[in-house]
Each structure stands twice: as C-alpha cells, then as structure tokens.
C-alpha cells in the first residue's frame, strides 16, 4: 500500500510516517498544501491523508481538486475537535473518512488499512478506455479498436493500472504492491514478464508501454 500524508506539523508527520513504514506501508509526506496537491496529481496512491488546515492550499481545496480531476482514491481528513463544519464540508465533497486530532496512531493505521483494502472498488464498474484500448472490468476482456483480446487475471489488473493512469510512470514497486501484495514473494522480474505479455497482446494497438529506465513503465498514445 502507498499513502500520501499531507501534514504541516513536522513532528506529527514524522511520527505517523515512521509507524506506517514499520507496518510495511509506503508513505510520501508533504508539509504544505501546494506540494501535497502536486504529489496527488503526479503519483498513484491507495489512500491520501489530508490535514484540513495547511499553508498554501487547504486540505479541502486539495480534496476538491482530486474529485474534480475524476480521481476516486480514498481520502481521509485530519480535523480539529471543534471543526464540525469542516467535517461536514469534507464529507459532502467526497472524503471517505476523518480522524479527529489528537488521535491514536493505531486507530489511524487501522482506518487507513480499511480504506486501502478496497483499491479498485471505488471506481465504477464497466468499461474503461484510453486511445484505441477498452477494458471491461467485469470480464477482464480487452478490446483493441473493437477487436477482443483475452487477458489473464493479472494481465487484466496490470492493464487496468495502465489505462487508469495513462502518461504516468508506474514503478515496479507500485505494480508489485497493487497486484501481488506487499507480503508476496513475487520479484521484479514477475512485473517484467507480465509487461512483456501485455506488449505482445497489444502489438496491434497504437498505444505503447514504454520502459522508463530506473523508474518504471508508462502507457502512451503514439498519435497524441
């Protein structure tokens, strides 16, 4: 699981990040709203945790932008005891949960894990598309310019990651964590093998899965 924590209290952010890392959760931190917004736009997260009161850009503003961009990643708000209006506003804007400060780190950890256990079900079922690709989430069948291509379960999961995040570099670690799980014994060459399979099966597509050396893979439209 990979989490973004946007919190301007550096001691609190460091403590929470340390707890997450001890529990095998990858965490990126940001100390202000602008940095947090940029990270949320350019990376893939399983859960985003936003303090509401942030310098530069509030947590609610970041949440609003995330939802306006069509991203349904689970978002948790960190709120003060007397911020009822902020809680209501956040939930109405699409927040999935909130925790009141001060909080027990074990409670925060449990809630984050609960949100992270549903990585894809926050997205609508049915077809997702990019360029000449269309993937049916229910059947796992891929269509290239209308022609069906049958994928295995893991190929379908990997294709879904690429189609949902076109133009974004996805690291091997993110793929391993999302598809095989952090406790899995799968190695990085497992990712390479499945990317190879997808490249063969999508050879007729105008899209390409490019390798970005030292960083990961990115799905691109050759006609864009």
Image (tube, grey):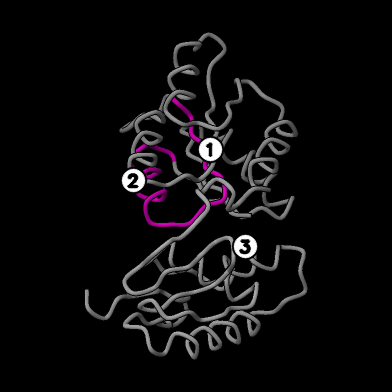
Give the quadrant of the N terminus: bottom right
Give residue 178's mark.
3
Q: Which residues are magenta?
A: 31-52
> SS of the residue at dot 3?
helix
Give residue 194's position: percent from left, percent from top: 59, 82
Query: Left of 160 or right of it: where is 178?
Result: right
Q: Nearer the viewer, residue 127 or 96?
A: 127
User: Which corner quadrant of the image does residue 104 belong to?
Assistant: top right
Residue that mark 2 sits on:
69
- Tell me what residue is drawn at x 46 percent, y 31 percent: 94
At mark 2, the secondary structure is: loop
**Which residue is pictured at 64% across the width and 73% down the height?**
154
Name the quadrant containing residue 42.
Answer: bottom left
Q: CA distance from mark 1 to mark 3?
A: 19 Å
How crowded is the residue under tag 3: few (<14 C-alpha within 10 Å), some, or many (20+)?
A: some
- Left or right: residue 169 versus residue 196 is left
Residue 213 appears at what percent x and percent y? 43, 83
Which residue is label 1 attached to?
49
Of 128 and 111, nearer the camera is: 128
How many residues crowd mark 1 within 10 Å: few (<14), some (14–19), many (20+)? many
Question: Does the magenta segment cover residue 173?
Answer: no
The image shows residue 149, relative to residue 103, as above or below, that is below
Element carrying mark 1:
strand
Tell me how many marks there are: 3
Please tell me which of labels 3 and 2 falls first in the chain. Answer: 2
């Amino acid at each position: 699981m990979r989490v973004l924590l946007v919190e301007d209290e550096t001691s609190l952010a460091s403590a929470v990040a340390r707890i997450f890392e001890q529990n095998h959760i990858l965490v990126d931190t940001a100390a202000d709203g602008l940095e947090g917004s940029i990270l949320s736009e350019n990376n893939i997260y399983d859960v985003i945790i936003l303090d509401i009161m942030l310098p530069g850009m509030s947590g609610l503003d970041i949440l609003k932008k995330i939802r306006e961009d069509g991203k349904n990643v689970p978002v948790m708000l960190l709120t003060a005891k007397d911020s009822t209006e902020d809680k209501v506003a956040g939930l109405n804007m699409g927040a999935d949960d909130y925790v009141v400060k001060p909080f027990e780190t074990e409670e925060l950890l449990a809630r984050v894990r609960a949100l992270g256990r549903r990585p894809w079900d926050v997205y609508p079922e049915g077809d997702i598309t990019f360029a000449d690709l269309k993937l049916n989430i229910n059947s796992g069948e891929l269509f290239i310019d209308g022609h069906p291509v049958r994928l295995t379960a893991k190929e379908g999961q990997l294709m879904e990651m690429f189609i949902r995040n076109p133009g974004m570099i996805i690291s091997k670690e993110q793929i391993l964590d999302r598809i095989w799980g952090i406790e899995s014994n799968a190695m990085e060459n497992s990712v390479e093998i499945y990317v190879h399979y997808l490249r063969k099966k999508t050879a007729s597509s105008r899209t390409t899965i490019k390798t970005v050396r030292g960083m990961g893979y990115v799905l691109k439209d050759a006609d864009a």
